[in-house]
Image: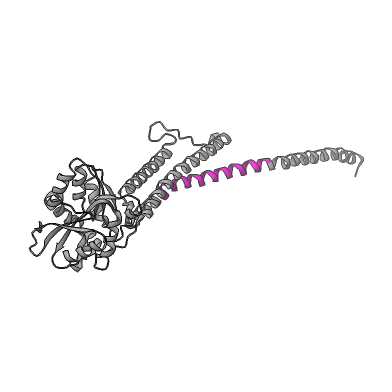
Amino acid sequence: MTTIEALNASAQQPCHREGEHIQEEEKMTEEQSSPELDLSALAFEQNHQTFRALNHQMWQIPLISMTLTGGLWFGVSKVDGSPFFQVALLFLATVGNACLFLVIQRLRYVIEQTLNWLETRSPANFVSAKGDCWYNRPLVVRRSFQSMLLLACFTSFSLLVMTCFQIDWSRVANPMTKTPASAYYDQHALDLADSYEGISADAAHPGLANILKEGFADARVDILDVGAGTGRDSAWLALLGHRVVAAEPSSAMLQIARHAHKDSSIQWVRDALPGLDIISSHTRRFDIIVLSAVWMHISEEDRPAAVSTIASLLKPSGFVYITLRLGPADAARSIFEVSLDELTELAGSNGFQIQYLETRPDLLGRDEITWQSVLLSTESKT
């Protein structure tokens, strides 16, 4: 190598080293700044994925609501004999839709915050879609979904309230064993109601009507109507100004009675002889106890207990009015044969005196049946 070449080589070495040094500094600068760039990109991607997930969940809520509400309403229609279960299902539907309303409110809020962040980070790539009509403006989807949820919630609550009013709570509180007689009246309640309500109470009970007119015209007494049926007699007694408690074992007949005479002040109770458990559990006693077309439904072995129960519910100066169905038994309706002699013996063993009132034909036109009316009292009634 010549002297000139050596000088040129030595002059180029510092420049080469300086270039390498600059490249190393740029590389170090890039390495120092790359973690921040990677973190920002990661956050952008993460928020983008979060937005997509939340948006998907929000669109699933109407489907969840329809499935929840429809399933619960269907369940209510299938559990007609379980009132507590019906109320529970409707309550769950009400609360479920209310909770979904709040969930969609929260989801849309988080989505909005995520969209705002994405717009700030990348305004050039962000689709605003502000809308210029009422149907494509922001929040129209959320409001539509929430309107559906409120409607489902309100409907479920309305059904809940109506169900509570329609349930025979006395039946729930007193789950009586269904007898053949009450089963028959439950099944044929509507047909029987037409025939019963077609006969006036004073025409069906002329003897009792005379007693009330002569001895209780200006009095207001406590009356228990046992086996009230459609409430015809109870409504008649209440219209005369008396305080009436109506006991009926058939839930269907009791429902008809409440609806047919809802304007009266009658206290309706689901109860039956021989025990009258609900009424007997209270200390209330009655001036008059009415058993119209009831005695024949009480079996022979239960009749002593029935008379004893009646005696315990009667005031010392009160009386019992009973109609006896004289005719053939009917096993399908749990109707047994009765006689005045049998009742006289049972009454005497419980300290009652019996007074015959009248015998009359069947008002429904059945030739094989007649009716006797009697009074039971602890003192003679004239």
Magenta residues? 36-64
Position of 198 compared to 64: left or right?
Answer: left
Query: Which residue lies at the image location 15% right of the left edge and 62% below the top edge?
Result: 325
Q: Which is nearer the eye, 130 or 209?
A: 209
x and y percent of residue 275 in the render? Answer: 31, 60
- Residue at the far right in the pictured view: 3
Q: Does the segment drawn in magenta span residue 51? A: yes
Residue 289 at least partly seen: no
Q: Residue at x 90, y 45 (%)?
A: 1
Q: Is residue 181 left or right of residue 107?
A: left
Which residue is at the front of the view, 134 or 209?
209
Q: Position of residue 37 (x, y in %)?
A: 66, 41
Name the foreground residue: 285 vs 73: 285
Indicate yes or no whether the magenta region holds residue 247.
Answer: no
Point out residue 13 in the picture as x, y percentages from the top left corner.
85, 40
Q: Is any part of residue 107 visible from this angle?
A: yes
Task: Give coordinates of residue 127: x percent, y percent.
Answer: 49, 36
Q: Quadrant of residue 20?
A: top right
Q: Residue furthest top?
A: 132
